């Protein structure tokens, strides 16, 4: 049987309500109170840069008004302001005003007296192409026309309404990705894609040209997308309502709205990639689906390096109202009733496994770089962990398309079994934990805890730690699993599992046998967790669970396969990679990370391709594409 390659996590980056993921800054925001004073200060500085509160010019730190500042003192004075501008919080006005969402109110107008016609003036250029029934032009006076209407006149009047939902997982206050590069009316999800993917690639610590010389062009893949597509005005949102708003549909709204466009943007404007690409959409499990595809490609040898991620920007009035009308979101009235308070506690809107009323919508974009074990050793790449496997199962027959079913029992059981097969029974029982889907809905708290409890019973697990990151970030739909992975990697740096701080008390109907649902941070030690299971339960029966291995387990496996000498050689090569990554780290602490964006750059055509006897060469790559393909069905052919 051919040796299966191990997919290693060699870099990660992104942006979420907790801040930047690279170098564990977003994770550090979750456990902020457990950090040292210096670590807290570094986290505040990174957030302040994101928020546009500080900048560095000619060796001097300035505030947003260009006044020179003593940075540490400035951050200390604005500590609470910075922290309050992260995580789940009350909706802010930088996206839209939740207190005055635009709408049209339909009215039926009549004359002042019964049976009396209506008369009004309007701009001649605004006359309908076809006059409605009952309209009569009395006279046209140049730019103005006088119209008489017999009977009633149906009109739409501009109006506003307040959002019933005012909690959301928003990116840090003041973060404006569209100002970091020439965004050219890109939907917000694509802006976040470019930022997040660039962050992951810069944190890699390897020159991309070196990778292109060592890896064949068809062995680099990109798997990324958005479950809800791009639904703001520059995407499908504008496409569907532009004419109803009296505007024109643009040439960009349709193509930039596609769900796979995050992958397309990375191929076209960051990597110049020609390898396999696309996205697998699975509602809230979409990232897991894409991770599964990349893992299978690497394990089988179909690719050697993959960029995997998701970007979701669903904080639009339409999406919020749609989820609210489904009864899925934690609205203000429900939060007030839940707590018996006069005002809603927006900060604690998401309460996984506690008394709760609905989930909290969020925006996020996260990317990881995977490569096979042999390539990682050759490149000296950083090793943040490994993906053991990803399991995907549907629910079977359903009464309601949104209700849970049996599929998640299958994915959790198989992920636990796969983890046990690699790290052993004792490690699964005593040195693993679960990142729950943990949406904060009454239905989820019961069904997901029942699944965990049953799987724990079967595998002899007595106190399985359960965490739920949506309590901090909210639910970013396609990016939810990517949030889990990017922020869980911090546990192997700081040794702390972030607790579910918003819940307070576990609800009575939650299944607890065999489980240790963490309502506070849990110090476990960076080397004392061997694996984590990332669970996802998506709309429509899209269930997925990923088994992620710790970096110390990955290194142990590398030494077993490749030998101690190979690992020693990797450690030596890794020194330069660590230094390069650290240079980017320091640079990103002094100036905002600007997306890589190569528009109309080094465009290739047929003249850049050379056919050889059994291969195909593409200009710019050091390795050819193999065309000497074997017949996989040889036993079925003559």
Image: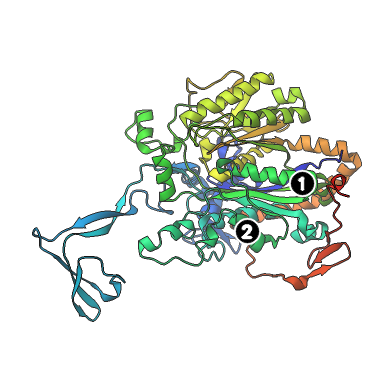
Q: Is residue 18 visible?
A: no
Please count the marks in the image. 2
Which of the numbered marks, if any, corresponds to residue 298?
1
Where is the N terminus found, in terms of image quarters?
Answer: top right
Q: State which quadrant residue 33 falls in.
A: top right
In x, y percent, where is residue 623? 83, 60
Indicate whether 445 appears above or below 43: above
Query: Residue at 73% across / 35% down in the picture?
Result: 549
- Residues at badges 2 and 1 in contact (C-beta under 8 Å)? no
In the displayed structure image, the side of residue 314 where residue 151 appears, left or right: left
In x, y percent, where is residue 199? 64, 53
Q: Earlier in the sequence, mark 2 or mark 1?
A: 2
Q: Nearer the viewer, residue 83 or 635?
A: 635
User: Quick one: SS at disc 1?
Assistant: helix
User: Quick one: SS at disc 2?
Assistant: helix
In x, y percent, where is residue 593? 61, 57
Q: Looking at this view, name the residue that lies furthest to the left.
A: 113
Query: Residue at 46% across / 55% down in the picture?
Result: 232
Q: Looking at this view, name the residue that lies furthest to the front.
A: 638
In the displayed structure image, the side of residue 339 where residue 375 appears, left or right: right
Instruction: Determine the CA span between mark 2 and mark 1.
Output: 21 Å
Image coloring type: rainbow
Q: Is residue 43 visible?
A: yes
Indicate whether 491 appears above or below 584: above
Query: Residue at 72% across / 50% down in the picture?
Result: 306
Q: Nearer the viewer, residue 169 or 81?
A: 169
For label 2, count other residues whose C-alpha is less than 10 Å away and answer few (under 14), some (14-19) or many (20+).
many
For disc 2, the marked residue is 264
For label 1, count other residues whose C-alpha is less than 10 Å away and answer few (under 14), some (14-19) or many (20+).
many
In x, y percent, where is residue 51? 51, 53
Which of the numbered marks, if any, corresponds to residue 454?
none
Indicate whether 466 appears above or below 190: above
């Amino acid at each position: 049987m051919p040796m299966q390659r191990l997919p290693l996590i060699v870099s990660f980056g992104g942006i979420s309500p907790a801040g930047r993921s690279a170098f564990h800054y977003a994770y550090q925001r979750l456990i902020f109170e457990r950090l040292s004073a210096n670590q807290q200060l570094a986290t505040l500085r990174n957030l302040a840069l994101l928020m546009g509160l500080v900048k560095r010019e000619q060796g001097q730190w300035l505030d947003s008004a260009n006044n020179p500042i003593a940075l540490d003192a400035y951050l200390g004075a604005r500590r609470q302001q910075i922290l309050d501008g992260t995580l789940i919080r009350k909706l802010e006005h930088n996206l839209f005003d939740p207190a005055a969402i635009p709408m049209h109110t339909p009215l039926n107008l009549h004359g002042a007296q019964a049976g009396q016609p209506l008369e009004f003036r309007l701009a001649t250029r605004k006359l309908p192409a076809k006059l409605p029934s009952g309209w009569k032009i009395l006279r046209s006076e140049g730019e103005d026309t006088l119209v008489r209407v017999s009977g009633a006149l149906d009109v739409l009047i501009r109006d506003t309404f307040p959002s019933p939902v005012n909690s959301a997982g928003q990116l840090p206050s003041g973060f404006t990705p569209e100002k970091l590069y020439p965004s050219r009316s890109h939907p917000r999800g694509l802006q976040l894609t470019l930022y997040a993917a660039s962050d992951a690639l810069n944190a890699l610590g390897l020159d991309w040209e070196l990778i292109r010389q060592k890896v064949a062009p068809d062995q680099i893949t990109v798997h990324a997308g958005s479950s809800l597509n791009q639904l703001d005005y520059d995407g499908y949102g504008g496409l569907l309502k532009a004419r109803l708003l009296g505007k024109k549909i643009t040439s960009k709204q349709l193509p930039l709205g596609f769900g796979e466009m995050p992958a397309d943007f990375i191929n076209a404007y960051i990597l110049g990639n020609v390898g396999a690409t696309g996205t697998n959409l699975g509602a809230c499990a979409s990232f897991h689906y894409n991770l599964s595809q990349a893992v299978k490609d690497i394990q089988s040898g179909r690719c050697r390096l993959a960029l995997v991620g998701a970007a979701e920007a669903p904080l639009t009035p339409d999406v919020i109202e749609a989820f609210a009308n489904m009864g899925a979101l934690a609205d203000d009235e429900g939060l007030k009733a839940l707590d018996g308070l006069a005002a809603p506690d927006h900060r604690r809107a998401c309460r996984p496994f506690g008394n709760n009323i609905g989930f909290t919508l969020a925006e996020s974009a996260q990317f990881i770089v995977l490569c096979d074990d042999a390539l990682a050793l050759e490149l000296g790449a950083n090793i943040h962990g490994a993906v053991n496997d990803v399991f995907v199962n549907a629910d079977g027959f359903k009464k309601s398309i949104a209700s849970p079913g049996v599929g998640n029992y299958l994915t959790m059981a198989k992920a636990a079994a796969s983890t046990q097969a690699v790290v052993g029974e004792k490690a699964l029982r005593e040195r693993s934990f679960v990142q729950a889907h943990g949406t904060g809905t009454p239905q989820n708290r019961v069904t997901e805890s029942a699944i965990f409890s049953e799987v724990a019973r079967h595998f002899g697990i007595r106190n399985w730690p359960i965490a739920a990151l949506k309590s901090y970030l909210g639910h970013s739909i396609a990016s939810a699993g990517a949030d889990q992975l990017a922020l869980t990697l911090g546990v192997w740096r700081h040794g702390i599992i972030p607790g579910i701080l918003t819940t307070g008390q576990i609800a009575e109907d939650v299944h607890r046998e065999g489980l240790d649902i963490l309502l506070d941070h849990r110090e476990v030690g960076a080397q004392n967790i061997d694996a984590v299971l990332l669970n996802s339960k998506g709309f429509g029966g899209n269930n997925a669970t990923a088994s992620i291995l710790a970096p110390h387990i990955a290194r142990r496996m590398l030494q077993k396969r490749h030998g101690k000498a190979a690992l020693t050689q990797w450690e030596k090569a890794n020194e330069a990679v660590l230094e390069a990554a650290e240079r980017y780290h320091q640079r990103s602490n002094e100036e905002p990370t600007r997306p890589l964006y190569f528009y109309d750059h080094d465009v290739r055509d047929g003249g850049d391709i050379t056919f050889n006897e059994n291969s195909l060469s593409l200009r710019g790559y050091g390795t050819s594409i193999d065309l000497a393909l074997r017949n996989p069905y040889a036993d079925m052919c003559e």
